[in-house]
Image: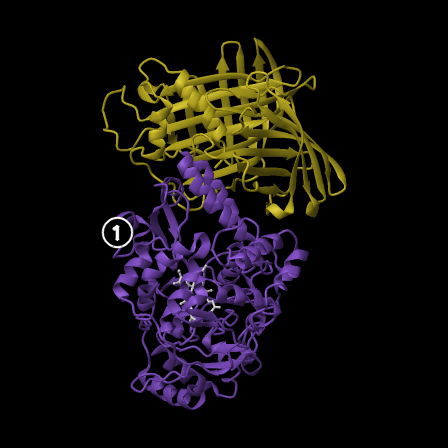
Chain colours: A purple, B yellow
Amino acid sequence: MLKNYLTKLLTKGCLLTAFFLTACEQTEPPQPIRYAPTGPVSAEQQRPGDPEAGYRALVNNAYISCGPPYTAYSQTASVPRPDQLLTGRTGRNKELPYFLNGITSANGVELVSSNCLYCHAGYFDGKLIIGLGNEFLDFTGNRTSRSERLGQYVKTEAEAQQWRKWADRIAAIAPYITTDTLGINPAVNATLALMAHHDRETLAWSEKPLMQPPKEKPLPVSVPPWWRMKKKHAMFYNAEGRGDHARLMMLASILCTDSVAEARAVDQWAPDIRAYLESLEAPDYPYPINDQLATQGARVFQQNCSACQGSYGKDAYYPNLLIAYEEVGTDPELAKKAVGKEGERYIRWFNQSFFGEIARAEPAPGYIAPPLDGVWATAPYLHNGSVPTIEALLNSPARPRYWLYPEAPTDYDQQTLGWHITEMDYGKTGAKNPKELKRIYDTTLEGYSNTGHIYGDHLNAADRAAIIEYLKSL
Amino acid sequence: MLLLLILSALLFGLLQHRQGSEPVRTLDQLNWFNNHGGSFIIPIDQPLSFPEDHGEHSGVQKELWQFSGMLRDCKGKNYGFQVTFFRLNMGNDLPQRQSAWASRNIYWAQLAYAAEDGDRLILKQRTSRDALGLAGYLSDHADLQKLWLYDWQVQVLQTPAGQSRFILQLADKNDNLQLTLQPVKSAIEMSLIEQMKFYGISRLLAEGSLQIGGQSRTVSGVAFFDHAWGNLPIGGGQLVWNRFFLQLSNKQELVILQSRRRDGSGTPVHSGYLIDRNAEVVELSRKQFELKILEYWESQKTGIHYPLSWQVNIPDKRMTLIITALINDQETNDEFVNWSGTVQVAGEAAGTKVQGSGLLQLSGYEAVP
């Protein structure tokens, strides 16, 4: 008891200054941190769930428990297009676009909260595909202007309380989610910032960070498709998400989770959401495929790629292989950071929190070679989205150093398996105006490098074309 | 997002200046319109098109036109002016009646001016429904659009060269403003939410006459025009707004929109636009400039302390401006109280001295108890 009380006192004391913070941390015996090795990732027990219930929960429930009042939203947002509406939604959700859930706050105010599909649903060939990462979100502007200014449409005090709560959270994480390039997703940095603002034990929100927050500038990350989870034994590019996947996924919803009780309530049906995610299949390639060439490609693939990426079709097999970043050679920053000094406090936070009860943050110094189902839909490629097409991925000298990020998924190139881009002969420093600046993907910047994964370089053009054709069939 | 202050003023207009058969509207009723109000067209997200978009967008719920600027007579005396037209649509699903009394819109207009040696803002207001031809909007051929409320009117003319000209005619007993406004820069879109369109023309040359109390003088100067339609907020909700529309002698203009929470929590947010002499628009992020309050003025009528003297710094552009009110009392003491008035600007830009004038709008302020 007393010890507990003392620890609490000390932890509170820690907040006073950064000096005390370090001083105090030494009073708690540092837990040894476990890192995962490279090599095969083994399967772990998952809690069972019902995929259908999971879908309903995903598109109706209040796992992100704050948002702007519905009245303010309805006066300011545009009416959703028919293609933005989903089936299987109830009540207010029926009329909301796919990326918002209608929820009711404890004080009875109707709110709209952003859901997982904001990042995890995308368009291909004009159709919305649940599970496809949205690679066209624009996080380059500061998000507080909008959340604050919505206050103009907020009337009652009950609504105002809810609006302030949400706007305060957005303001707290805004510095950590402002990217400098279109399409780059700041979810990882956002999560780290949110951990810093939530008490590890109680999950209570703190206006001031309780541990040092991450660097403001997010490392570039592209949103992976959910259907990979069917095969993957660990979550995230560096496979740091170990143990119970449902618990790990819940971390993406902690924006307004303020108590362990709240988290436990969501945890009741989180396994259903996991089951739904892991039931998802990659979509079918919507354009013609040259079967003969694809069969030829299958052979080349088998010889050159399968060892890491697995095999598909009848005797499908996926090796769940984690490759050291030195070996694969793709931009190391994301993996390095997680296993470096900077990552320690987040690993500790996670593993000692409610989330760590049945899940673990256990990064490895590398990246997992992902399953390639539906890979043709997921451009741009690599974890940082630095390579615009599969053609360039298989031929590293042809990768553009600077390119203009496309604004929407409207112009697909069936030859190269990517969105049409414009190659540039200058990077961000040469940008002519702010609009161009945010659209320039500059692979010379830290975290943005397009190096590595040179496993297609030795192939001839015909073999590469055959592999591309084959990938369309996955 | 803008100009709720005008909206507030106009609510007052609707409440206080009912004419003839006007239905009684309480604030509650208006809020009802605001939240549920029938069916309205929501402005669609498409590029602006002129001259059509200068005119009325009939299906939308609310629409606001505002001209403001500073005029100078031949003796060198300065006058600030603001001309506002507002339209409230009561609902597209109101039953269509054939009667000449039938109406769907309420119009409200205001003429406000202040002389530099005056002691307060002079306000004239009018309200009417669009029944019986008392108020309305007409565009019978492409070259002429007209918005009127009784004998007050704004005309948009197209010159043969395809440029728009605005003609303002507002007479009230012994006061009379007649202005021709000629844009020298193109419109910039500043819409902040999806259900609303908002653009401004940051510099127009103004020429005409201003008659005050029976005495007329020839005037000229620069003006700002802004126009918004869609779901404009009525009242400020939870926010206090400070809006600056400034025109500088170096032919640049600066627009700053700053808001903060009324309860004092959170951090203020501001955004801005700097329009270059060659009409190039630079959107200023909030990191690029800072705003400082230098001095407050206390209104005797309402007890509100308004920040009427400001400093703006834009280090990137080597710009420092001091903004002061032309006269202090430009408060509109209506149902919603706010301060909307002409300001003068002096400072430096890129190493040279600049001056200027503009409009400052402060809304959402409350008296400190």
| Residue at mark 1 | A90
Indicate whether B103 appears above or below B50. above
Crowd rating for badge 1 (residues with CA inside 10 Å; few <14, some 14–19, many 20+) = some
User: Count the marks: how many?
Assistant: 1
Residue at image coords 57%, 13%? B211
- Residue at point 32%, 50% (across, down): A96
Question: B59 and B15: which one is in front?
Answer: B15
Residue A150: percent from the left, percent from the top? 45, 41
Q: Confirm whether residue B324 shows in the render.
A: no
Three-letter residue code for mark 1: Thr
Q: Looking at the picture, how far across and down is residue A383, in whole percent? A: 49, 71
**Circle 1: element type:** loop
Left or right of residue A361, residue B327 in this image: right
Q: Position of residue A114 (x, y in %)?
A: 40, 53
Which of the 4 quarters of the picture holds residue B321?
Answer: top right
Residue located at (52% from left, 69% from top): A384
User: Is residue A392 visible to us here?
Assistant: yes
